[in-house]
Image (tube, grey):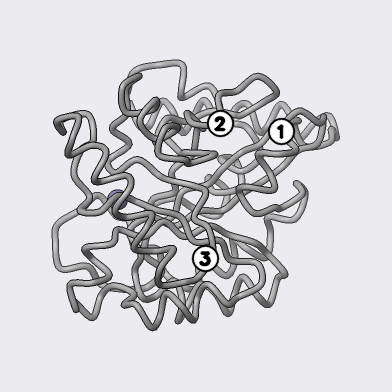
Amino acid sequence: MRGIQRNFARLLSEVRALVPLAPAPGLRILAFHAIGSSLPFPHYGISMTPARFEQAMSSLVPAQNAGLTDAVSRVDSQAALLALTFDDGYRDVLETAVPILRAHGLAASVFITAAFAAGGAPLYLDRQAIVELSREPRIEIGSHGATHRRLTECSDGDLRNELRDSRHQLEDWIGRPVRTLAYPHGAVDRRVRDAAEEVGYESACTSRFGVNRGGTDPLLLRRNEIVSADSLRVIRQKAEGFWDWKGKVRS
Ligand SMILES: [Zn+2]
C-alpha cells in the first residue's frame, strides 16, 4: 500500500512539475516528532536525522510559513500556508530543531505531554527547557495531553482532566496562554473534540492527512505526518499538497 501511495504522489508531482503553478492554496500542517534522538522503543521511524531535517527546512520555502494559531486565523485566505509541528516534547526539538528553524526564520508549534516533561527522562524537555523553548519568538507551546492517553478511551472526567490539567500545567510554567492541542495518538471523536473546545482550546490537530481550508473545523485540523523514511522529495510533496488525498482513503 505504501509503495502505491508513494508512486501516486510521485505521479502527481511529476504532472504538476510540467505546469509551473503556485503552491496549492490552503493550510498544510506537517507533523514531526524527534530530530536526531535514538528512541529506546521500537517505532515506525519518528526520529528524523538532523541532516535530513536541515535539507527539508532549506527547501520548504514556497508556501508561507506561519505559527499554527496565526495560520488558522488566515485559513480563509487563498494563501498556501505551511505550519510545522512537533509532538511529544523531545529535548532534541530545542537542541537540534530550533537552531535550524531559527536559521531559516521558520515558526513551529511544539506539543508537550505534561507527564513526560515532569517525569525526568533525559529524552524529553523538562520544565526549564520548556520555558527556554517558549521564549523563542517563533515557537508556540501547545498541549499533547497530561499523560498521552487515548482520549477517546477516557471517561468524561478523565478526558476533562487530561485536557485541562496539561493546559494549566504548561500555562503555569511558561506564563502565557496555551491555545492549541494535538490529540495523543490522533485519537479523537465528537465527544473529545467538544471537550477540547469546552476546556478552551482554539485549535487542535488530528493525525489525519489532508489540507485545511476555509470552513475547516479548527478543532479537527488535518496534518501530514513525516516519518524518518521519507526522502526529501516526499517531505516536499507532503508540504505542497501531493499527499492531501491520503486523508480520504483508509490506509
Ligand atoms: Zn504523541
Q: Which residue is drawn at the image coordinates 22% and 29% (left, top)?
A: 152
The secondary element bearing badge 1 is classed as: loop
Q: Which residue is drawn at the image coordinates 50% and 75% (left, top)?
A: 133
- Callout in the foreground (3, 1): 1
- Callout in the foreground (1, 2): 2
Left or right: 88, with 230 as reference point: left
User: Seen from this angle, which residue lies furthest top?
Assistant: 249
Looking at the image, which is closer to me, 66 or 230?
66
In this rendering, does residue 90 appear at all? Answer: yes
- Amino acid identity at mark 1: Val
The secondary element bearing badge 2 is classed as: loop
**Residue that numbered label 1 is attached to:** 75
**Residue that numbered label 2 is attached to:** 218
Q: Quadrant of residue 149?
A: top left
Q: Position of residue 100 (x, y in %)?
A: 59, 75
Task: Give the mark nearest the N terminus, 3 or 1.
Answer: 3
Mark drawn on residue 53: 3
Using the numbered discs, state the Cα–Cα distance from disc 2 to disc 3 in whole angstroms: 27 Å
- Amino acid identity at mark 3: Phe
Left or right: 145, with 24 as reference point: left
Q: Which residue is drawn at the image coordinates 49% and 61% (left, top)?
A: 141
- Mark 1 CB lies closer than 8 A to ligand 1: no
- Amino acid identity at mark 2: Pro
As drawn, 45 above or below 94: above
